[in-house]
Amino acid sequence: MDVLDVAARANATGPVCDACLGRLVADRSFGLSNAERGSSLRVALALRDDEDHEPVDTEDCWVCEGRCTEFDEWAERAAEAVEGVEFATYNVGTRPPPLIEENEALLREEAGLDDEAGEPFKSEFNREVGKRVGRLTGAEVSFDRPDVQFTIDLAEDAIDAKVNSTFVYGRYRKLERDIPQTEWPCRECKGSGRQGADPCDHCGGSGYLYDDSVEEYTAPVVEDVMDGTEATFHGAGREDVDALMLGTGRPFVVEVEEPRRRRVDTDRLQSDINAFADGAVEVEGLRLATYDMVERVKEHDAAKRYRAQVQFDADVDADALAAAVEELEGTTVEQYTPNRVDHRRASMTRERDVYEATAELDDPRHATVEIHGAGGLYIKELISGDEGRTEPSLAGLLGVGAEVTALDVVAVEGEDEPFERDEFFRD
C-alpha cells in the first residue's frame, strides 16, 4: 500500500501524533526520526489532497497517549539512577502499558498494515531514550551484556538500572599449605558455627574448616576497590588444600557484582592483594576481563606437573622404583572416585593419562616423585592406590604401601593459551 494511503487511513482514526504516524512506515525510509517521517507525511498529504493536515499535539494522541513527549524525561531519570556509577556501555528496554500495545495493533489494522509493518512503539522508545542517555552520560549503547541495563516500566512509572558484574582475571600462587581455594563451610554445622545451643566442636564455632582461603585473600580486596556489593572467586580447577600452587600459578577470575567503579589500576590492585595476603598467596597478571572469561576459566582442564614427597611402608630399592615409574609413564589410569572426596563428588570411574613420570629415591623409605598428567588426575591416589580404587598405582606396582606426605603443583600447562586473545579483556 502507498505510504500516503497508509497515512490517510491512520489519520482518519483520530488524533495521531507525528511519531506514531511515522512509526507505521519506519521500515520504508532511513535517516529520519519517526516524528520527522510523520511530519513529512502530513505535508505530502496536504499537497496531494489540497487539504490541511495540521500537526496533532502529541499529548492528544490516542495511540501513545502522549508518551512520545517523555523521551527526555526518562533519559534524565536513567542518568540519575546511576549517578556515581562508572560505566562505558548501556542498553535501554521498555515495558509499554498493555493499552498502548493494543492501540498500536489497532492503528496498524485500521491503516491496512500487517502486524510486522513499521516499528513497534517500544523499539522507538528504547532508541530515543537510549540516544539521550548516551548524550547525558558519555557511554555507548551495547547489545552484548552492557555494563548497565535500564528497564523502563511505563505502566508503573518506574525505572530499574541493573549494574552488571565486572571481572578481573589473573593467576595465583599458593605458597602455604592448608589453605583451600575457596571458603570451606563446616559440614557438621553447615557454616552456622553452632550445634544446638553450643559452638560446633568440628570447626570450633567459626563455621569454617579453615581460617583462610585464596578467595578470602583476593575477592574482598577486588570488591572493595571496585566498590561492589559482593565478589565471587572462579578458579581454573583447584589443587588440594594441603598442596602448594607454584610456577606461574593457576588462572582465576574474580566477579564483582554491582560495581560502582570499573576503571581501576590493576597494577595497584595486584600490589594491594599481595600486601594483604602477606606471602601466603601471590597474584600476578591482573587484567580487566569480560563475562566470557568466567566460562573459559571454569571449563579449562589443563595438564599439570606435580612434585610429590612419598613415604613407603617398607624399604624400596632404586631399581624397583625406576621400573615402577617407567611402567606408569604413558599409562591410562582408571580412578574410581577417591575415598577422601567421595562425600562431595559423584561416584564414578574416570580415565586419566600419565604423560611422564620420574622418581628419585631419597632413602629406602622416602622418594621424590614428579608426575606430568592430564587435568583431573588424582596424584595422591596414583601413588597410594586408594585401596584398589586407582589402577595402576605406584604402590600397587611396587607391592609396598605408599603415601604422599607433601604435594606441590609446579605448573598448570598452557594456562594462558585459552585466555590470551584481546576479546576476553577490557581496556
Image (spheres, helix red, strand yellow):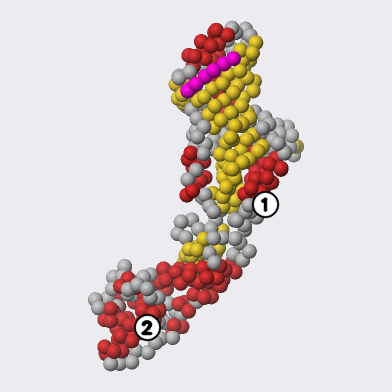
Q: Say what secondary structure mark 1 lies in.
A: helix
**Mark nearer the N terminus (1 vs 2):** 2
Extreme residue toward the right, this view: 198
Residue 235 appears in the figure = no
Q: Residues within 10 Å of mark 1 (few under 14, many from 20)?
A: some
Q: CA distance from mark 1 to mark 2?
A: 52 Å
Structural crowding at the residue carrying mark 2, measured as other residues with C-alpha within 10 Å and reported as few (<14), some (14–19) or many (≥20): many
Query: Image check: 263 left or right of 290?
Result: right
The image quadrant of residue 30 is bottom left
Q: Residue at x 54, y 17 (%)?
A: 358
User: Is residue 316 or residue 94 the one in the foreground?
Assistant: 316
The residue indicated by pointer 1 is: 224
From the viewer's side, name the closer residue of 354 and 270: 270
Indicate whether 63 appears above or below 346: below
Q: Residue at x 50, y 34 (%)?
A: 414
Amino acid type of the residue tagged 2 in the rendering:
Ser
Q: Is residue 88 visible?
A: yes
- Residue 210 in picture, x, y percent from top left: 69, 34
| Nearer the observer, 24 or 289 | 289
Q: Amino acid at mark 1?
A: Asp
Q: Residue at x 65, y 55 (%)?
A: 227
Image coordinates for residue 132, horizontal then vertical, percent: 50, 72
Main SS type for the magenta part?
strand
Q: Is residue 340 magenta?
A: no
Residue where numbered disc 2 is placed: 39
**Is 358 part of what is drawn in magenta?**
yes
The part of the chain drawn in magenta is: 354-360
Horizontally, residue 7 falls left or right of residue 85, namely left
Looking at the image, residue 59 sits to the left or right of residue 78; the answer is left
Q: Looking at the image, which is closer to me, 138 or 195?
A: 138
